[in-house]
Image (cartoon, helix red, strand yellow):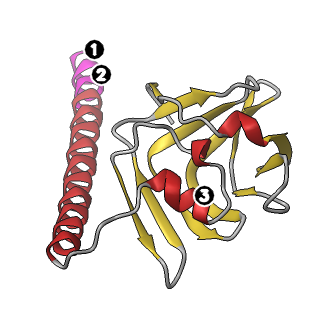
Amino acid sequence: MDSILSKAGGMFFSRKASDISDSIANDASSLSNSVTEGASRFINRMKGKVQTPLPELLQKYQIPKGVFPKNVLNYEFDEATGKLSVLLPFVCEVKFKDDSIVRYDRRVTGVLSTGVFKNIEGMKTKIMMMWSKVISVTMDKPESTKVVFVSSMNKSRPRDAYIILRDGIEVDIF
């Protein structure tokens, strides 16, 4: 009996140690990314480059400014490749005027071009009571009245629901 309890206790502590080491590795990775991004922002400021606010950048590319929550910390955008990386203070979700819900991870990445935000990582939407990973957000035409969230099912939503910036509400998990 002691042997069984000893093995069970050993497995418990081994799993706990593994969870703790994974947590430390994730924290270190997050810190490394934050330092790198902070250094990049600092260098750009020293060069005299002023970053356009994210809502203005989205509008320039004909994406409604409210597609991202108001509480964005920072973003990085490479005009040459269209690569966009948006940083949020926590995992959050936003309920929009049309009752749609979008959830955001702490980092959302994708490729931004006129009327399209594609190859998205870190965003999902609720469709018929199930969460579905958002692959892209598109506008058919600049004057379009619909925003299309492409996931396992395409979901057209009214553009005017995404015109106003809304606060993201913190949630536990992405």
Q: Position of residue 157 (x, y in %)?
A: 81, 39
> In which image quadrant can residue 117 be found?
bottom right
Q: Position of residue 24 (x, y in %)?
A: 20, 45
Q: Which quarter shows the N terminus?
A: top left
Residue 11's place in the image compared with 76, above or below, is above
Give me the C-alpha separation between circle 3 and circle 2. 63 Å
Question: Nearer the N terminus, badge 3 or badge 2?
Answer: 2
Residue drawn at x 59%, y 42% as measured from the top left: 66
Residue holding disc 3 = 59
Instruction: Say the numbered circle drawn on residue 33.
Output: none
Magenta-tinted stretch: 1-10
- Residue 143 magenta-highlighted: no
- Tags 1 and 2 in contact by the CB under 8 Å rule? yes
Residue drawn at x 70%, y 58% as measured from the top left: 136
Q: Nearer the viewer, mark 3 or mark 2?
A: 3
> In which image quadrant can residue 159 be found?
top right
Residue holding disc 2 = 4
- Tags 3 and 2 in contact by the CB under 8 Å rule? no
Residue drawn at x 17%, y 61% as measured from the top left: 35
- Tags 3 and 1 in contact by the CB under 8 Å rule? no
Residue 47's place in the image compared with 24, above or below, is below
